[in-house]
Amino acid sequence: MNDSVRQFKYVDYLWDDKTAARLGDDQVALFLYRSNILGADLRITNYGGGNTSCKTIEKDPLTNEEVEVMWIKGSGGDIGTLTKAGIAGLYTERLRNLKDVYGGLDDEDRMVGLFNHCIYDLDSKAPSIDTPLHGLLPFKHIDHLHPDALIAVAAAKDSEKVTKEIWGDTMGWVPWQRPGFDLGLQLEKCLADNPGIRGIVLGSHGLFTWGDTSYESYMNSLEVIEMASAYIEKKIQEKGSVFGGQKIGSLPEKERAEKAAQLMPLLRGLCSSENRMIGHFNDSEVVLEFINSNDLDRLAPMGTSCPDHFLRTKIQPLVLDIDANADFTDTDAVLRQLKPAFEQYKKEYADYYNTHKRANSPAMRDASPVIIILPGVGMFSFAKNKQTTRVANEFYVNAINVMRGAEAITSYTSLPRQEAFDIEYWLLEEAKLQRMPKEKPLSRKVALVTGAGGGIGKAIADKLAEEGANVVLTDIAEDRLQEALKTYGRDTASYAVCDVTKSDSIENAFKKACLDFGGVDIVVHSAGLAISKPLEETTEKDWDILQNVLVKGQFELAQKAVAIMRKQNLGGDFISIASKNGLVSGPNNVAYGTSKAAQQHMARLLAAELGSDQIRVNTVNPDGVIVGSKIWEGDWAEGRAKAYGISVEELPAHYAKRNLLNQIIYPADIANGVFALVAVLNKSTGNIINVDGGMANAFVR
């Protein structure tokens, strides 16, 4: 590790000399390495924000001459996870020659299309709008970042004067301008007017820094950010408080979580009036300091400054005027307060759109808020998927840090509404949205699956996640859940230890679903066990545990799930994983078969009751799922083998031969049955799907 690590207090020094040495003189690899470690610190740049580049000398494949090529993050990428596949390689000279055909600010959108005529690497990602900002500067390595501290400087009143005060003559400054070719020309002019500067502050936007090597650029970026951070902290200490001090106190942590879990399904339902949304909750110290402050009511309506912020958070949050100590279990009373707040927010957003729209502006998008603030409790966000809502939440934390710093320096200034609108509804931004891949069938839905630590339950969770759902895995064994969770991406799944025989355990699992994702849309009761004994050997304990896990557990799951689904007012699905044994009378099976039959009929009863809520209740009946099923790891296999007069080893072949298709049934087959009911058969309720290879005596009739 380099000794320079000791220089920094406010940012993390992550450069590792050994890692860099392994990359040798591969400047593109070093640029990617630098990008990744810069993107690893959210104080330096946000997810998907900023841009990095390097310039190398390459051989032109057509002329065999040496030419300069600029390698830069492509459109829509993230520097923290950037790879070679996510960058664009362009002829630098061709890019600079575009100055000869640039027609001014009205020509910006056409210029983006011309970037493609500068492509050197045919495998390039689409060049981003920031491409000329890097290309018109002469430096080998360039970082364009959105550090909270720098945006605070950029968004502060008298930003140019503040820049001079912090860095003297070593930093340039250019006023706010929408990213594009002309901004590149302004950076070029700033450098020409101020030779020898180490970087440029972009008003209301961010930072440009550079170096002759990847390491020099990295160190330059960190040093500039560190100086801004130290300056801001000194100002805060001088003022003695931030955001005008505390207006209200926070509820205790446990109460905040309880209130948030109660509120999130209601907020999710209101945010999903046009498109179903996924939620995220944040009650960190940074958030609470802001939302509980005297200045919240002044600063929140001003909106964010950096374009990267408001593109993800909307121009401003919805601040709820609700007493955090109120009884949130009274759903009707809470909704009477929430609905007018949402209606007013949407009206104001529509006014914002109609006031600032251009003749060629895209149609108004969903007017629902993305960021919702409840003083005393925390900050909620709602967007199309978990990653998007989490990132939006993180971006608003960045915006809070910016407001905090700018207020400490002088005072915070936001972008004029017209400037903000022109970026939010930029035709190029709309084109980017239209290029997004088609959503999967279960995108925007949240599924809770019991018994998901392995076997059939895990296979069901896997299938639902594969098709786009967020999944909450539940099981009685935390070690199994921890192992299962490792198989999912960061923003796909969470888990809750849940014993379905205990009401409070079920309630806690649903609270986890609400806190992690905003609510629940699909509940699959897959937790189970099997006991195969003749009547005389079946004990009361056997009977009770089967009834408690399979029947009473299903009842309590349904009861608590429906309460949340009704809060959301988005409908839902409840799936019971029962068994062929609920339909077929077989030997040595009285307790298990009875409980499975009870599950099946309960599902029919619930379907009849919940149809008016658009909550569909269906059953999947497996049979003979031996391979990969947890049930067959215990005494059940021996019991069934004994009932059929065969050995345990003969069971798989026995079960495969007895069905009409002569097929082995796997957990994934049961998962497909669940998927069909929740994603394909969307007008089916009260039904049973047998996934058993065809058992004539189990035909539903």
Image (tube, rainbow, N blue to C red):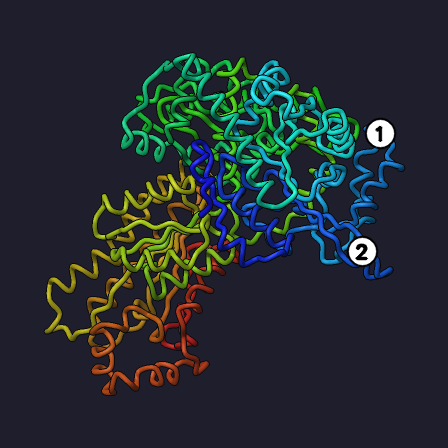
Task: State the residue in front, 187 or 685.
Answer: 187
Is 237 left or right of 72, judged from the image as shown? left
Is there a contact, CB below 8 Å, between mark 2 and mark 1?
no
- Badge 1: residue crowd in 10 Å (few <14, some 14–19, many ≥20): few
Earlier-in-chain disc, 2 versus 1 = 2
Residue 671: x %, y % from top left:
43, 63
Question: Mark 2 belongs to which amino acid?
Answer: Glu
Residue 104, which numbered label? 1
Q: How many numbered callouts? A: 2
Task: State the residue in front, 220 or 465.
Answer: 220
- Tell me the residue at 58%/33% (across/down): 146
Is 104 left or right of 656, judged from the image as shown? right
Q: Secondary structure at mark 1?
A: loop
Quadrant housing residue 238: top left
Q: Secondary structure at mark 2?
A: strand
Q: Is residue 393 above or below residue 164?
A: below
- Badge 2: residue crowd in 10 Å (few <14, some 14–19, many ≥20): few
Residue 38: x %, y % from top left:
53, 42
Residue 693 seen: yes
Quadrant housing residue 101: top right
Residue 607 seen: no
Residue 467: x %, y % from top left:
51, 57
Is 633 left or right of 663, judged from the image as shown? left
- Tell me the residue at 30%/67% (across/down): 582
Residue 454: x %, y % from top left:
33, 63
Reading the image, the residue beneath label 2 is: 66
Among all residues in the image, which is located at the extreme right? 100
Q: Is residue 637 above or below residue 267?
A: below
Quarter holding the C terminus is bottom left
Per the model, the C-alpha gap separating discs 2 and 1 is 32 Å
